[in-house]
Image: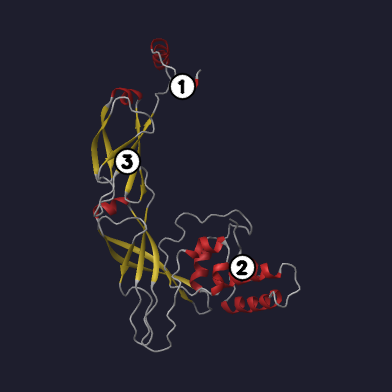
């Protein structure tokens, strides 16, 4: 996927005002409109211009795009940096109908964060828009639950029309057993309503912080456990970390590297708990001393072992 420099596409500097962006878009849209333009690849350019304007005209989307920084070059291979949008509020929808024709770059940044509807009523007493934000929590928070203080970022339009990033802190109750991808709804914490209408709601999408030991798939948790060759060959009882504390795990004699051992209901503590899978990884001792090399040579001589026997060699 290629990075798109929306400022370059519309031919404005990064500090351009909203009025500057609007004028540049209208000029280019007239020049490349496929119904009237004689320019080569007019239709492609027209779509690129429309996509760039879809982002830069909106202070919220523009501020989110600006967070990617300036180190990217147009056409450069691009993948969104991990967590680039976490803790940042996106409000409901507002995309034009043409948004479905935009690039994979646009979709990767904004496609999953937007609610594709907007309140259109012209009456007073309008309910505010809902907001959506990804939040990072520790895996252990799902096991313990409790209240966490979260700092969220959102945008407000500045005097010159450029977006200003503001922060607010909320105390949020994390339910025990919550899973990655689930949402917490905070009623009335979205955008304010108009004409006395109620505020919208804030939806927090749960994302687990990367963990040094565990990987999460749905309600199940996976742990790679290093074991010595003799522990795998002879069997052993080994203390194993879990998000809820250490447990003793029996390693069966004759275990293989890559073998999975299941700890039932030691995964996410949902109404139907997940499981924890321990994946064995046999680790060989280093042959970095004469004693270690001597032991390896002794095994070579005394054990009738051929790891390639099934290959006929």
Check contact, mark 3 vs mark 2: CB within 8 A.
Answer: no
**x%, y% of residue 218?**
35, 51
What is the distance, in whole Å, between disc 1 and disc 3 at their CAs?
29 Å
Q: Which mark is residue 282?
A: none
Residue drawn at (57%, 77%), measured in percent from left and top?
Answer: 18
**x%, y% of residue 178?**
29, 57
Q: Which residue is mark 3?
A: 277
Local SS, label 1: helix
Q: Which of the two marks, 3 or 2, is nearer to us in this view?
A: 3
Q: Nearer the viewer, residue 2 or 22?
A: 2
Count numbered badges in the picture. Answer: 3
Q: Nearer the viewer, residue 63 or 262?
A: 262
User: Quadrant where the N terminus lies?
Assistant: bottom right
What is the distance, in whole Å, between disc 3 and disc 2 at their CAs?
48 Å
Q: Residues within 10 Å of mark 2 (few under 14, many from 20)?
A: some
Residue drawn at (25%, 42%), measured in percent from left and top?
Answer: 264
């Amino acid at each position: 996927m290629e990075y798109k420099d929306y400022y370059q596409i519309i031919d404005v500097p990064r500090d351009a005002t909203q009025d500057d962006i609007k004028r540049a878009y209208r000029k280019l849209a007239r020049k490349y409109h496929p119904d009237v333009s004689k320019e080569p690849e007019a239709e492609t350019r027209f779509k690129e211009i429309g996509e760039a304007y879809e982002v830069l005209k909106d202070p919220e989307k523009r501020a989110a795009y600006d967070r990617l920084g300036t180190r990217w070059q147009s056409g450069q291979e691009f993948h969104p940096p991990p967590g680039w949008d976490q803790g940042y509020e996106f409000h409901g929808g507002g995309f034009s109908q043409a948004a479905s024709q935009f690039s994979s770059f646009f979709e990767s940044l904004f496609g999953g964060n937007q609610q594709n509807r907007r309140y259109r009523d012209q009456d007073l007493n309008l309910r505010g828009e809902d907001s959506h934000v990804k939040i990072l929590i520790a895996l252990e928070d799902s096991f313990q639950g409790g209240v966490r203080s979260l700092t969220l970022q959102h945008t407000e339009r500045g005097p010159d029309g450029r977006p200003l990033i503001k922060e607010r802190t909320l105390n949020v109750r994390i339910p025990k057993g919550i899973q990655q991808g689930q949402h917490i709804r905070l009623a009335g914490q979205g955008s304010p309503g108009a004409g006395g209408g109620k505020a919208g709601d804030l939806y927090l999408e749960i994302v687990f912080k990367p963990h040094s030991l565990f990987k999460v798939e749905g309600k199940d948790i996976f742990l790679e456990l290093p074991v010595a060759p003799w522990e795998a060959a002879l069997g052993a009882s080994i203390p194993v970390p879990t998000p809820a504390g250490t447990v003793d795990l029996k390693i069966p004699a004759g275990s293989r590297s890559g073998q999975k051992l299941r700890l039932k209901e030691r995964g996410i503590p949902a109404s139907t708990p997940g499981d924890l899978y321990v994946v064995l990884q046999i680790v060989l001792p280093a042959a970095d001393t004469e004693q270690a090399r001597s032991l390896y040579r002794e095994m070579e001589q005394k054990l009738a072992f051929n790891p390639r026997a099934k290959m006929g060699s």
